[in-house]
């Protein structure tokens, strides 16, 4: 009895092969198909969740530029910063110089010295005063001697040894001496007063006026050191070193931190989220970097539709908020109207 296995082997060779790898690949296709079907629903659910429970707003950066101008005709000695550099309030930005102001200052200093020398000479010239003082000393001696002789004649008269005529003459001499002394005393006082008035009216007055001019010039020279009025960033320099600039000419443009803010619009449906001033937020820049900010003013509606009695019911109505950064905005983001997102806690 014999068995023929040849035909059976051929059938086995012709039977289909179910390799494990092919079955696994089929499951991957099913998974991918399932993901493709569910992805829109997952995204839709995420959008519904974020729009309903997570409050955010679209906004853009706003800032005001401050133009720095030359305080007087001057030369640019040195620019201390380059565009993009940040600075603090009072920090020096550039140095100017004015040969004209320096020349005027030297002239006024020389004028002060001249006036002071003339004043000193006036007060030290005592020749006339010394002459009057000597004359007054002699008049005082004559007055004392007249008093002495009057007393002598009065003693003699009491003893009956002289006549009344001698006493009257002694009185006359005493009165003459006294009047002469007083006249010299008045002349001395008048001379001293005139010197004081002359010194005050001419020298002291001119010295004070010149000192006031010097003070103004020194203030003008101090202003040639251009300093930052507030903390901020240097945006642009419109002059060059060693350049001559005129009074009032633009020399630089700066952006101060106080002027940088963000205007954002919040959907009116978030009104019930207790949106309020001083609320802290996150400012999200286009590349994903975040800094902290704060709502600076009470939110208001950006637009009003008088035809609707309930403005909240309109999806087109948006709430306008103003956000101030609590941190310095990096220079690369200091671009007018740069779009940003405001994320609420």
Image (spheres, rainbow, N blue to C red):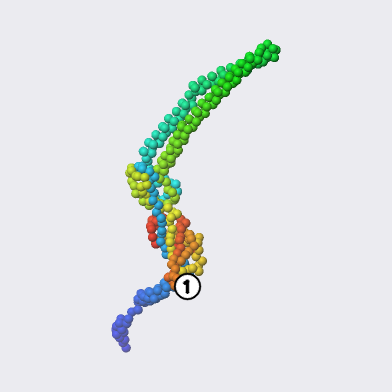
Crowding at label 1, few (<14), some or many (≥20) Cα neighbours within 10 Å? few
Q: In which quarter of the image is residue 287?
A: bottom left
Depicted 187 relative to depicted 220: above or below: above
Residue 116: quadrant of the picture: top left
Location of residue 35 with respect to 238 vertically, above or below: below
Residue closer to the observer: 275 or 212:
212
Quarter occupied by residue 4: bottom left
Q: How many marks?
A: 1
Q: Where is residue 324 in the image (x, y as percent from the top left)?
A: 46, 58
Q: Residue drawn 45% across and 48% down?
A: 89
Task: Please tell me which residue is depicted at 42% across the width and 46% down the height of the picture.
Answer: 227
Which quadrant, please, contains the N terminus?
bottom left
> On the image, numbered disc 1 is attached to which residue?
309
Image coordinates for residue 329, horizontal then vertical, percent: 42, 56
View extreme (bottom): residue: 1
Secondary-structure class at tag 1? loop
Q: Residue furthest top?
A: 161
Residue 147, percent across and down? 63, 17
Residue 278 visible here: yes
- Residue depicted at x 36% and y 47%: 249
Q: Can residue 50 be seen in this view?
A: no
Taking the image as shown, residue 288 lies to the left or right of residue 144, namely left
Farthest right residue in view: 159
Against 220, residue 31 (above or below) is below
Q: Which is more toward the observer, 326 or 159?
A: 159
Residue sitting at x 43%, y 67%: 303
Q: Which one is in front, 185 or 161?
A: 161
Q: x, y (%) of residue 185?
A: 56, 24
- The residue closer to the viewer here, 65 or 192, is 192
């Amino acid at each position: 009895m014999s068995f023929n296995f040849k035909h059976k082997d051929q059938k086995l060779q012709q039977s289909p092969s179910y390799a494990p790898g092919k079955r696994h690949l089929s499951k991957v296709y099913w998974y991918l198909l399932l993901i493709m079907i569910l992805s829109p629903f997952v995204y839709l659910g995420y959008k519904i969740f974020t729009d309903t429970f997570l409050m955010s707003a679209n906004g853009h950066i706003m800032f005001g530029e401050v133009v720095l101008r030359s305080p007087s005709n001057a030369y640019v000695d040195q620019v201390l910063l380059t565009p993009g550099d940040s600075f603090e309030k009072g920090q020096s930005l550039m140095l100017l110089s004015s040969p004209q102001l320096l020349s005027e200052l030297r002239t006024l200093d020389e004028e002060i010295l001249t006036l002071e020398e003339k004043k000193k000479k006036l007060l030290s010239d005592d020749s006339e005063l010394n002459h009057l003082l000597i004359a007054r000393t002699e008049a005082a001696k004559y007055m004392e001697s007249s008093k002495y002789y009057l007393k002598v004649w009065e003693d003699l008269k009491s003893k009956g040894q002289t006549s009344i005529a001698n006493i009257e003459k002694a009185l006359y001499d005493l009165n003459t001496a006294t009047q002469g002394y007083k006249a010299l005393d008045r002349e001395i006082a008048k001379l001293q007063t005139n010197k004081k008035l002359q010194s005050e009216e001419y020298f002291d007055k001119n010295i004070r006026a010149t000192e006031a001019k010097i003070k103004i010039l020194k203030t003008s020279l101090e202003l040639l050191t251009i300093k930052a009025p507030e903390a901020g960033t240097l945006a642009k320099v419109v002059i060059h070193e060693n350049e001559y600039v005129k009074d009032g000419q633009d020399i630089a443009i700066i952006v101060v931190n106080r002027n940088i803010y963000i205007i954002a619009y919040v959907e009116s449906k978030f009104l019930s989220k207790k949106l309020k001033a001083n609320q802290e937020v996150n400012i999200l820049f286009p590349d994903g970097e975040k800094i902290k900010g704060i709502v600076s003013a009470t939110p208001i509606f950006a637009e009003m539709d008088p035809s609707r009695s309930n403005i909240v019911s309109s999806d087109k109505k948006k709430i306008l908020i103003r956000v101030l950064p609590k941190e310095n905005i990096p220079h690369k983001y200091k671009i007018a109207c740069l779009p940003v997102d405001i994320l609420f806690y």
